[in-house]
Structure formats: C-alpha cells, structure tokens
Amino acid sequence: MEIIGLDLKKDVVAFCNKVASDLHCDGLQFLVGDIAGYKDDHADMVVTLHACDTATDYALINAVSWQSRVILSVPCCQHELFKQIHEPLHQPILKYGILKDRLTEYLTDGLRGLKLEAAGYDVAMIEFTTLEHTAKNIMIKAVRREPFDAARVERAQSQYEQLRDFYHVHPCIDALAFPAASDRRI
C-alpha cells in the first residue's frame, strides 16, 4: 500500500517524513505540493483535513478524475462564495457578515455534495468531531456508487445547477468533470 500526503509547508512535510521514517512506515510519503496541480492516475481513497477554501474542491475534482472509491473530506475556510453570493431576497440576512459567512459555508458544502452525487457517488455529510474541538466539523463522505444510476446523476446535477443559479455563484467545484458511465472503472 502506498500513501501520499501533500502540504504546502516544507517544514510540515519534513517533520511528517521523519515521523514516517522513524515509525518504519515504508509506504507513507509526504510531498510539498498543491493539490490543484498534483498529478496521478489513480487513488483508491482521497482524504482531506481542513484543506483551505478551494483546495477542497481541487481534491474532490482530482478524486473523481481518479475514480476514487472513497472520499473523506473535512473542508475549511469556505471563502470563495462569500465574495460571489448575490440573491436579493436574502440581502437583509446577507448584510450581517457572520450570517453571510455561515450561509456560504453551508452552500459551498451543499453544492460540493450535489456535484459528487452527480458524479455517481453516494454522499453523506456527517459530524467529524464535536464543536468544542473545532467549528469546522463537517465531513463530506462520498462512496462511489456501482452500478451507475443515470437518473440519479441527472437529478443531482439539475439540483446543483438550480441552487448555483439561484444564488448567482460560480464555485470552483463547477470544474468537476466526471467520466461517462462507460469509462468508469469497477
């Protein structure tokens, strides 16, 4: 088994590689890198922990392109839609920064979940840890669904588009392109 960890901080990567070496974890390797530019051809499982802002989206996009069987993602710092959201009906609420922030966090993760469903995954949003440890405690759990259910995929994509368009946002997860049913590995 091979496990690859990515982080942008060289000191964190050096520390993690030393720990892996000290513990004789030969299949565990950490690299300095950005998930957005990381290239591979396959990963059975993708795990992210507090990947900031759109880094979560790039991890999800890569996981789907690799046809990963399982995705476990704990997002963090969902700021992308905060700057974009515009919906006149909700402006009286959105004028309060903290409420706008929370709404866009939920909207971001909801759109991510729908996009993963549209890619053929069963998705659940679960509590990762209690609020006393971190406010960022939602985990997106996605398991690739077999057999591929075209009607379910189309429904999720339609719901995604309706929600995205209602709020006038263009999230990074929009770039998620998924393999056709005939191209999917089992």
Image (cartoon, helix red, strand yellow):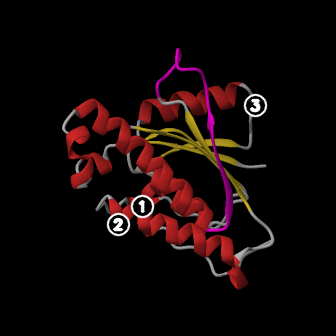
Residue 25 lies, in percent from the top left, at 74, 35
Residue in the image at 69% along x and 25% along y: 22
Residue 54 lies, in percent from the top left, at 39, 51
Does residue 147 appear left or right of residue 72 in this picture?
A: right
Label 2, residues with CA under 10 Å away: few <14, some 14-19, many ≥20:
few
Confirm whether the magenta stretch covers residue 130. yes
Pointer 1 residue: 163
Tell me the SS state at disc 1: helix
Residue 26 lies, in percent from the top left, at 74, 40
Residue 185 lies, in percent from the top left, at 76, 74
Kindly identify the amino acid type of the residue bearing the numbered disc 2: Asp
Nearest to the observer: residue 10 or residue 48:
48
Farthest residue toward the bottom?
Answer: 182
Pointer 2 residue: 165
Kindly identify the amino acid type of the residue bearing the numbered disc 3: His
Q: Which mark is residue 24?
A: 3
Residue in the image at 51% along x and 72% along y: 158
Q: Which segment is the magenta one?
A: 119-135
Q: Disc 2 versus disc 1: distance between alpha carbons?
A: 5 Å
Q: Is residue 33 visible?
A: no
Kindly identify the amino acid type of the residue bearing the numbered disc 1: Leu
Q: Disc 2 versus disc 3: distance between alpha carbons?
A: 50 Å
In which quadrant of the rendered view does residue 174 lie? bottom left
